[in-house]
Image (tube, helix red, strand yellow):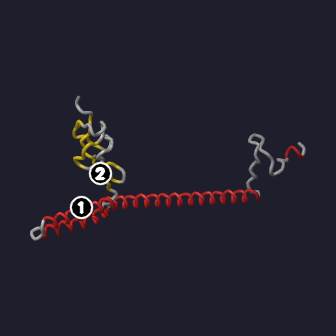
């Protein structure tokens, strides 16, 4: 054999099967470097994995905190959501109590004015809470906001027009709380 047949070739020779550099021979200086490089890469990968795990745990904890905070806010809104309305109704209550206390001494006109003032206080409190009344007298009948109590023949009003309001309806921020109960015009009998 000649020297070229026994020589395994250069240290970075390609593995003929894999097409990749062959591993350095044991005892070679490059093997220690390759091992150190491999250990270094493993450590970096473990550190990156630990950072990702910590980031995941922080995100999961933050999500849990947001969930708990939202649950507390919903519970608080449920418990204290009517606080504004209740505060607005307290002057109405005070006015009613004063009216009852003075009813024995007051004349009818004074009592009537007291009732009107109490009603104004109540309407102001309801309006502040987003509650508005539906008073559709003279308007076309709207089945989404009105409840027809009866049809009434009328020559003065167009058919399907509200002739009279039996009970006012109310909206809460544009959403129907109670429909207005109404009498609706129909063509007179012939």
Query: Where does residue 86 sit, x and y in percent of width and height?
Result: 27, 63
Q: Say which quadrant the N terminus sits in.
A: top right
Q: Which mark is residue 184?
A: none
| 129, 161: nearer the viewer | 161
Which residue is farthest left? 104
Q: Is residue 18 left or right of residue 83?
A: right
Q: Residues within 10 Å of mark 2 (few under 14, many from 20)?
A: many
Label 1 vs label 2: CA separation? 15 Å
In what element is the residue under mark 2? strand
In what element is the residue under mark 1? helix
> Which residue matches tag 2?
170
The image quarter in which residue 158 lies: top left
Q: Is residue 153 above or below residue 89?
A: above
Query: Where does residue 187 sit, x and y in percent of width and height?
Result: 27, 33
Query: Where does residue 105 sit, x and y in percent of width and height?
Result: 10, 71
Q: How many marks?
A: 2
**Residue in view at x 28 percent, y 42 percent:** 162
Query: Where does residue 18 sit, x and y in percent of width and height?
Result: 74, 42
Which residue is farthest right? 2
**Residue in view at x 76 percent, y 59 percent:** 29
Q: Which label sits in the foreground, 1 or 2?
A: 1
Are dots 1 and 2 in contact, CB under 8 Å?
Answer: no
Q: Say which quadrant the C terminus sits in.
A: top left
Could you tell me if residue 148 is visible in this image?
Answer: yes
The image quarter in which residue 147 lies: top left
> Which residue matches tag 1?
119
């Amino acid at each position: 054999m000649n020297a070229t047949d026994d020589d395994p070739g250069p240290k970075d020779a390609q593995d003929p099967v894999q097409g990749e550099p062959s591993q350095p021979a044991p005892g070679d200086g490059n093997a220690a470097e390759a091992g150190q490089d491999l250990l270094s890469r493993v450590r970096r990968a473990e550190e990156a994995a630990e950072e990702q795990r910590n980031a995941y745990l922080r995100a999961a904890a933050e999500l849990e905190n947001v969930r708990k905070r939202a649950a507390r806010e919903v519970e608080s809104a449920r418990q204290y959501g009517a606080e504004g309305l209740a505060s607005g109704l307290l002057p109405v209550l005070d006015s009613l109590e004063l009216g009852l206390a003075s009813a024995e001494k007051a004349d009818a006109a004074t009592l009537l004015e007291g009732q009107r003032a109490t009603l104004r206080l109540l309407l102001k409190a309801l309006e502040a809470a987003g509650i508005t009344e539906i008073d559709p007298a003279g308007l076309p009948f709207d089945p989404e906001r009105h409840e027809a109590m009866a049809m009434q023949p009328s020559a003065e009003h167009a058919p399907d027009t509200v002739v009279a309001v039996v009970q006012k309806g109310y909206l809460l921020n544009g959403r129907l709380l109670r429909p207005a109960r109404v009498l609706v015009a129909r063509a007179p009998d012939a």
